[in-house]
Image (cartoon, rainbow, N blue to C red):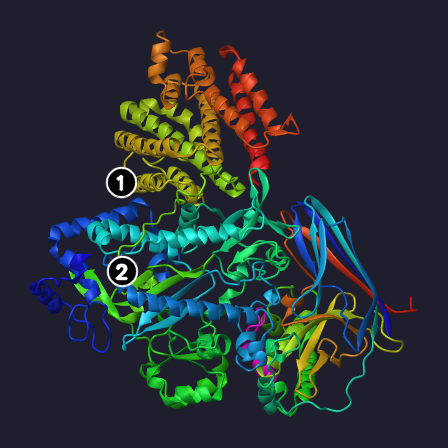
C-alpha cells in the first residue's frame, strides 16, 4: 500500500515512544534500538493511531464478538487451588494487535524452516529405520533408548507413502541479536493452525480496511494444498480422510472440530475405528467404511492399546498392525514425538551437516545434553546463563523452569554432583530471551514477549510454510507469562508484502469440474450423540412445560391445588427431576447432558446453535440460584422455553437434512412420544384429580387447538383424540410416530436383503396399531403398553446403528 | 535336552464379548547355540477371524488373533518340541562394576541385544528407593558384575516368600517387595529394578520351566505356570547372563525362553482388548516334560 512508506505524524510517534519502553538488551518488533518505528509497522500504526479511542474500542469489540459468536475457546487445566483440579473452557484470549513481519524477512525464515523439516524427516527415518546415526556415533544410544517417545514397535515400520512427517510446527523467537532462533520442534501432532485461522478472521474484522491494503497473503491456500495432498495420499478413492481426536476433554478439541469442518474431513475418536484385514475402518450408521488417511491429533503412544500404551482408553487396537501392513497413511507417523525431545536439539546442528551437507539456516537455542563429560564441563563453566531441565521433556522452553542456574541457589558443587549422577536425564539450555511486540494493555501499547509458531505442511510441491502463524504474547513482561495456561494471549501474524497477493480460498478454482460431494456416512458415535442430543433437549422442554404448569397452579390456587400437584409427581420422577425448587437440579443436569452430547458433534453443528445451547444453560443456571416457586418460576420457565425454541429453530432451519439430522429428529420424536404417553397415562386416567385433563392439554401445548376443535367441555375422549391420535397436531403421539417412521425409512439399510429389519418391523406394527385405534379404546393400560413399545424402539435403533 | 511343552489357556466369559484383538507371546524362542524349536502348533477354539505371527522389536514371536464377537469361551493351546542346551560359564569373565558405564557407552547399537534398552527405568519399573537400598546392601562386597547378579539373586530369594496369592499381575514391584512376597514375575521385576539401580542393564525373561525335576532333585517353584527370570548384561566380554531369583540358580537347561523385554509389559503372555462386559475367568496350565518321560 502506498501509505505504508509514509511516516505517521511525528507527534504520534512521540506519543508512542513516551509510553512504550522495551526492556533493555532485548529486541523489539515495533521499534529499533534508537526507538524509531520499523518501516513494516508504519502503515498499520498510522491507521491505528488515526482511530479515535471510541472507534478503536468498537473495532476491537468486533473481533471479540466474532470469536464469541463462533464459539472459539480453549480448555484450561485447573490447578487444585483454582478449579478443584477440573479443566474449564475459557474464552479465546486474543491480543488484537497482529505481529507484523516483512515478506523479505519471512522468505528467509521459511527457507530455514523447510530445511529443518527436511532434517527432522531424515532423523526420523533413521531412528525408525537403520539407526545409522547411533551406529556412527552421531547420536548417543542412551539418549534414544531411554526416550519414552521412541516407540520400539514402530522400528522398521515403513510409512506407506515413504514420508514419516507431513505436518510440523516450529516455535521460534527472536534473540537479542535480532536473529530468529528455534525454541522447540513440534512434530507429534502440532496444534494451533486452526486457531491461527480464527485469529486471522477476528483480527482482520477489527482492522478490515488496513488489512485489505497491506498485501497480507491469505492462509486459505496453505490449507487447500494440504487438504488436496491428504486426499491424494489415499490409495482407495472410495475411502476417506479422517482426523483422529483424543476427545472433547482435550485442550485443543475445539481446533480438531474446527479443522475437520473447515477441510471437510470426518472427525473420529479412537473407539469409532476398528482394524480388520489390516485396513482401518470407521463404524458408521451405514456399517464399516474404510479410512485411508488419518491425520492424528493425539499423542502416538495412545493410538493403539495392544501394541503401544496398554493403559490407553482412547486408542484403536490393531492400529500398529495396520500401519505395519501399510494399510493406511498416518500424519504424522507414530513415534514422531521423539523429535520433540529437548536434548535432541544439542545434536541437530551437527546432524544438519552430516545429513543435509549444510549448516542450519536458523540456529536452535544452544543446548547441551548432560550425558557427556565434555557437555557437563561446558555447563559447569558458565552455569549463570543456563537452564537445566529433563532431557526428554517435549514441552516448550518457557513451560519448564526458566530460572537461570545462578538464580536457583544451587551451589556449583551440588550442581556438579547432580550432573554426574543424573547427567543422561538432564539437558542444559541457554536461558530464553524473547523479543517484545506491542500489545494493547488498558488502551496503551506496551511491549510484551513474543514467541511464534510457524506451520509447515508437506504438499504436492513439497514443504510449504503457512504464510502467517500463531503468535503468543506474554501477559506480563516475564517470558514465563507467554504460556496460555499462564494467562498469555494469542495474536495473528501478518506477512507484509510489497505487492498485492493473489486471492485464494478453499473453494476449487473455476477450471476444476464441478462435482457434488455427497456427505460421507455418519460415524455411529456421532449418530448416537445426535440421537441423545435430540432426546435431552426434548426432555428439557418436557420438564420445563410440566414445571411451568405446576408453578402456575401453585401461584393461582396454592394448597387447594395439592391433589393435582401430587398427581404430577410421578411425571417428574419419570424425568429424573424433583419439582421442589423453581429451576430444579434435574433440569440443569438434563441441559448438561444435552451440552455434553452436543460437544461431541461440534464439527456437525452451526456455531450459532451451539452458542444458543450454551446461553440457555447459563440462563438456567443463573435462574436456579434465585428463582422462587410460584409465579416467579412460571415466568422464568417461560423465558427458558423461548430460548430453547430458539435453539430448536436454529437446528431445524439450518441443519443439512442428512443422516445426522435424521438421528437428532428421531431422538426428539422419541422423547416427545415417551413424555406424551406418560402425561396421558397419568393425567387422562379415570381416577386423575379435577383439572388433570386441562393440565394435559396445557402441557401438550394444545390449548388453542382444543378450544377450536372441541367447543364443548373437555373430556377424556377429546383429550386422547387431540394428544394421542390427531395426525395434524405436532404434539400428538401419532405425529411423533409418523415422524419416526418417516426418518427410519430413510436410514441406510432399513431393509435387510429386501426384508424389513427388526427395527422397521417394530416401527410399522406400532404405527399401524396406533393409527387404527379409537380414542375410547386407548385406556390407561393401553397407553402404558404403547409407551413400553416406544421405549423398545430406542433399544432396536441402538442395536442397529449406534454401536 | 528335548522337551515337549503343552500350554493351555482357558477363558470363560460371563456374557458374550465383543470382537477382540489379542496378542500371545507364548511360542518358545529360537536362540542360536542354546535353544531350537523342533516343532510347534498354536490352536484356537473357536477359530479366530484373523491370525498372524510376527517378531516384535525384541525378536519375540507374537501370535496375533482377532476373535469373533459373541465369544463366551476361548481356549488357546500351544504345543512345541524344544531342544535346550546349556553350559553354565565356568569362569567369571564379567566386567568390574566400575567399568560397566564406560563399556556400555562404547556400544553404538540400538538392536534388541543392546544393553541401552535395559538400564533406564521402564514403564512398569520406575526407580524404587527401597529396592535400590536393598540392592546396595546385598551386593556391597561384590566386585564384578557377575558377582552382583548372583549376590542380588540369592539375597532376594532369601528375603522373599513365594506366594501365588499375594500379588496380582499389575502389582508394582515396589509393593511386592514391601510385602516380601510374590510370584516369579515379582521376583524377576524386583531383581531387575535392583540391578538397574546399581548400573547393571537387566531384562525380563518370560519362558517355561520343566514341570518335574530330574530324579533326586526338588521340584522347582513356578513350574505349573509360565515362568519368569532375569537377564543381566555383565560386560562387553561376557555379555548377557541369566539368573532365576525365584529358585536362586543360574539358568541352565531346565529353563526354556519365550522372549525378552524391559519388564513384564513387553513380554506379557496375553495382551488384548477382549471387551469385558462381564466377569471373566481365566486359567493357564503348563506341562513340560523331557521327551520319553510320562
| A434 or A557: nearer the viewer | A434
Q: Pick out the residue farthest to the top.
A: A712
- Residue B44, image x and y in percent? 77, 53
Residue of label 2: A497
* Residue numbers of the magenta segment: B120-135
Instruction: Check disc 2 and report its element: helix, strand or loop.
Output: loop
x, y percent for residue B267: 67, 67
Asked if the magenta segment contains residue A286, the reply would be no
Mark 2 or 1: in front is 2
Q: Quadrant of residue A507?
A: top left
Q: Are marks 2 and 1 in contact (CB under 8 Å)?
A: no
Is residue B49 shown to the viewer in this render?
yes
Figure disc tally: 2
Residue A245 in sight in this render: no
> Residue at coordinates 57% horizontally, 41% vertically from top-left?
A803
**Residue A164, horizontal then vertical, whole percent:** 53, 63
Disc 2/disc 1 C-alpha distance (Å): 56 Å
* Callout 2: chain: A
Q: Residues within 10 Å of mark 2 (few under 14, many from 20)?
A: some
Characterize the local packing of mark 1: few (<14), some (14-19) or many (20 or more) Cα atoms within 10 angstroms: few
Can you give x and y, in whole percent of width and height, for residue B17 in the image?
Answer: 66, 46
Above or below, A635 relative to A359: above
- The label shown at residue A626 is 1
Q: In the structure shown, which secondary structural element does the residue marked by tag 1 occupy?
A: helix
Residue beneath the point at 45% across and 67% down:
A117
Mark 2 and mark 1 lie on one chain; the one further toward the N terminus is: 2
- Disc 1: which chain? A
Q: Which residue lies most toward the front here?
A: A511
Query: Residue B241 shows which numbered tag?
Result: none
Amino acid at each position: 500500500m502506498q501509505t505504508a512508506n509514509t511516516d505517521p505524524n511525528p507527534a504520534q510517534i512521540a506519543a508512542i515512544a513516551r509510553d512504550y519502553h522495551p526492556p533493555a538488551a532485548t529486541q523489539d518488533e515495533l521499534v529499533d534500538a534508537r526507538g524509531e518505528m520499523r518501516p513494516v509497522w508504519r502503515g498499520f500504526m498510522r491507521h491505528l493511531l488515526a482511530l479515535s479511542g471510541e472507534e478503536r474500542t468498537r473495532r476491537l469489540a468486533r473481533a471479540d464478538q466474532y470469536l464469541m459468536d463462533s464459539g472459539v475457546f480453549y480448555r484450561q487445566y485447573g490447578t487444585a487451588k483454582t478449579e478443584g483440579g477440573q479443566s474449564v473452557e475459557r474464552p479465546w484470549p486474543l491480543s488484537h494487535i497482529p505481529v507484523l513481519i516483512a515478506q523479505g524477512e519471512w522468505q528467509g525464515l521459511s527457507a530455514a524452516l523447510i530445511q529443518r523439516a527436511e532434517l527432522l524427516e531424515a532423523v526420523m527415518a533413521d531412528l525408525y529405520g537403520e539407526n545409522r546415526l547411533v551406529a556412527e556415533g552421531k547420536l548417543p544410544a542412551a539418549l534414544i533408548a531411554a526416550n519414552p517417545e521412541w516407540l520400539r514397535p514402530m522400528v522398521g515400520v515403513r510409512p506407506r507413502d515413504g514420508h514419516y512427517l507431513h505436518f510440523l510446527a516450529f516455535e521460534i523467537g527472536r534473540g537479542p541479536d535480532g536473529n530468529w532462533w528455534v525454541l522447540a520442534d513440534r512434530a507429534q501432532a502440532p496444534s494451533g493452525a486452526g486457531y491461527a485461522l480464527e485469529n486471522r478472521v477476528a483480527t482482520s474484522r477489527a482492522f478490515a480496511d488496513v488489512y485489505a491494503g497491506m498485501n497480507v497473503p491469505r492462509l486459505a491456500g496453505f490449507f487447500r494444498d494440504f487438504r488436496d495432498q491428504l486426499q491424494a495420499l489415499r490409495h482407495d478413492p472410495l475411502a476417506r480422510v479422517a482426523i483422529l481426536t483424543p476427545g472433547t476433554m482435550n485442550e485443543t478439541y475445539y481446533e480438531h472440530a474446527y479443522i475437520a469442518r473447515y477441510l471437510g474431513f470426518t472427525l473420529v475418536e479412537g473407539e469409532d475405528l476398528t482394524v480388520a484385514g489390516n485396513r482401518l475402518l470407521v463404524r458408521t450408521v451405514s456399517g464399516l467404511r474404510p479410512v485411508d488417511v488419518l491425520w492424528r491429533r493425539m499423542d502416538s503412544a495412545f493410538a493403539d492399546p495392544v501394541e503401544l500404551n496398554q493403559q490407553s482408553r482412547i486408542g484403536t487396537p490393531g492400529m500398529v498392525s495396520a500401519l505395519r501392513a501399510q494399510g493406511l497413511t498416518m500424519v504424522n507417523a507414530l513415534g514422531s514425538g521423539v523429535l520433540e525431545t529437548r536434548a535432541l536439539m544439542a545434536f541437530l546442528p551437527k546432524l544438519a551437516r552430516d545429513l543435509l551437507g549444510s549448516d542450519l539456516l536458523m540456529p536452535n537455542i544452544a543446548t547441551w545434553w548432560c550425558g557427556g563429560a565434555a557437555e557437563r564441563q561446558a555447563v559447569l563453566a558458565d552455569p549463570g546463563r543456563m537452564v537445566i531441565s529433563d532431557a526428554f521433556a517435549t514441552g516448550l522452553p518457557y513451560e519448564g523452569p526458566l530460572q537461570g542456574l545462578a538464580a536457583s541457589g544451587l551451589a556449583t558443587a551440588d550442581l556438579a554432583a547432580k550432573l554426574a549422577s543424573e547427567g543422561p536425564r538432564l539437558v542444559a539450555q541457554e536461558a530464553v530471551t524473547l523479543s517484545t511486540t506491542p500489545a494493547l494493555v488498558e488502551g496503551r501499547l506496551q511491549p510484551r514477549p513474543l514467541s511464534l509458531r510457524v506451520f509447515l505442511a508437506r504438499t504436492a510441491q513439497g514443504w510449504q510454510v503457512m504464510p502467517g502463524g500463531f503468535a503468543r504474547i506474554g501477559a506480563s513482561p516475564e517470558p514465563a507469562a507467554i504460556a496460555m495456561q499462564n494467562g498469555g494471549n494469542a495474536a495473528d501474524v501478518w506477512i507484509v508484502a510489497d505487492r498485492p497477493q493473489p486471492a485464494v480460498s478453499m473453494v476449487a478454482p473455476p477450471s476444476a469440474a464441478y462435482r457434488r460431494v455427497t456427505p460421507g456416512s455418519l460415524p455411529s458415535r456421532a449418530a448416537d450423540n445426535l440421537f441423545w442430543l435430540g432426546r435431552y433437549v426434548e426432555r428439557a422442554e418436557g420438564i420445563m412445560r410440566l414445571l411451568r404448569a405446576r408453578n402456575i397452579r401453585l401461584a393461582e390456587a396454592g394448597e387447594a391445588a395439592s391433589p393435582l400437584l401430587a398427581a404430577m409427581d410421578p411425571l417428574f420422577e419419570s424425568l429424573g427431576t424433583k419439582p421442589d425448587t423453581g429451576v430444579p437440579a434435574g433440569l440443569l443436569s438434563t441441559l448438561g447432558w444435552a451440552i455434553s452430547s452436543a460437544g461431541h458433534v461440534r464439527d456437525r453443528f452451526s456455531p450459532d446453535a451451539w452458542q444458543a445451547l450454551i446461553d440457555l444453560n447459563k440462563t438456567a443456571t443463573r435462574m436456579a440460584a434465585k428463582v422462587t416457586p410460584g409465579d416467579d418460576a412460571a415466568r422464568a420457565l417461560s423465558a427458558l422455553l423461548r430460548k430453547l425454541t430458539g435453539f430448536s429453530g436454529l437446528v431445524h432451519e439450518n441443519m443439512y437434512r442428512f443422516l445426522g439430522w435424521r438421528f437428532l429428529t428421531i431422538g426428539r420424536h422419541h422423547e416427545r412420544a415417551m413424555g406424551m404417553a406418560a402425561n396421558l397415562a397419568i393425567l387422562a386416567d379415570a381416577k386423575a384429580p379435577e383439572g388433570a385433563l386441562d393440565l394435559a392439554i396445557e402441557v401438550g401445548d394444545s390449548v388453542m387447538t382444543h378450544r377450536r376443535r372441541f367447543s364443548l367441555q373437555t373430556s377424556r375422549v377429546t383429550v386422547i383424540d387431540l394428544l394421542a391420535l390427531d395426525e395434524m397436531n405436532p404434539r400428538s403421539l401419532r405425529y411423533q410416530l409418523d415422524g419416526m417412521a418417516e426418518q427410519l425409512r430413510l436410514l441406510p439399510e432399513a431393509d435387510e436383503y429386501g426384508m424389513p429389519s427388526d427395527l422397521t418391523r417394530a416401527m410399522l406394527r406400532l404405527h399401524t396399531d396406533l393409527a387404527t385405534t379409537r380414542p375410547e379404546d386407548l385406556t390407561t393400560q393401553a397407553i402404558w403398553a404403547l409407551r413400553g413399545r416406544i421405549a423398545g424402539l430406542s433399544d432396536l435403533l441402538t442395536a442397529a446403528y449406534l454401536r | 535336552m528335548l522337551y515337549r511343552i503343552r500350554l493351555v489357556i482357558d477363558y470363560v466369559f460371563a456374557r458374550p464379548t465383543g470382537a477382540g484383538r489379542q496378542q500371545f507371546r507364548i511360542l518358545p524362542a529360537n536362540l542360536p547355540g542354546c535353544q531350537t524349536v523342533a516343532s510347534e502348533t498354536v490352536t484356537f477354539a473357536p477359530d479366530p477371524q484373523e491370525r498372524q505371527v510376527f517378531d516384535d522389536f525384541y525378536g519375540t514371536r507374537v501370535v496375533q488373533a482377532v476373535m469373533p464377537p459373541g465369544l463366551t469361551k476361548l481356549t488357546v493351546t500351544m504345543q512345541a518340541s524344544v531342544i535346550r542346551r546349556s553350559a553354565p560359564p565356568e569362569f567369571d569373565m564379567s566386567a568390574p562394576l566400575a567399568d560397566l558405564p564406560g563399556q556400555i557407552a562404547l556400544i553404538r547399537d540400538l538392536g534388541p541385544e543392546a544393553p541401552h534398552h535395559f538400564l533406564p527405568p521402564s514403564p512398569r519399573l520406575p526407580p524404587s528407593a527401597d529396592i535400590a537400598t536393598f540392592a546396595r546392601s546385598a551386593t556391597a562386597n561384590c566386585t564384578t558384575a557377575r558377582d552382583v547378579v548372583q549376590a542380588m539373586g540369592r539375597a532376594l530369594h532369601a528375603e522373599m516368600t513365594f506366594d501365588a496369592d499375594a500379588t496380582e499381575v499389575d502389582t508394582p514391584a515396589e509393593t511386592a517387595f514391601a510385602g516380601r512376597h510374590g510370584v516369579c514375575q515379582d521376583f524377576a521385576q524386583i531383581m531387575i529394578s535392583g540391578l538397574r539401580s546399581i548400573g547393571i542393564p537387566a531384562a525380563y525373561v518370560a519362558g517355561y520351566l520343566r514341570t518335574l525335576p530330574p530324579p533326586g532333585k526338588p521340584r522347582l517353584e513356578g513350574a505349573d505356570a509360565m515362568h519368569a527370570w532375569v537377564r543381566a548384561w555383565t560386560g562387553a566380554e561376557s555379555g548377557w547372563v541369566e539368573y532365576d531369583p525365584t529358585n536362586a540358580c543360574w539358568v541352565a537347561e531346565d529353563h526354556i525362553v519365550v522372549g525378552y523385554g524391559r519388564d513384564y509389559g513387553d513380554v506379557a503372555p496375553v495382551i488384548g482388548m477382549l471387551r469385558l462386559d462381564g466377569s471373566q475367568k481365566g486359567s493357564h496350565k503348563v506341562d513340560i516334560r523331557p521327551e520319553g518321560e510320562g
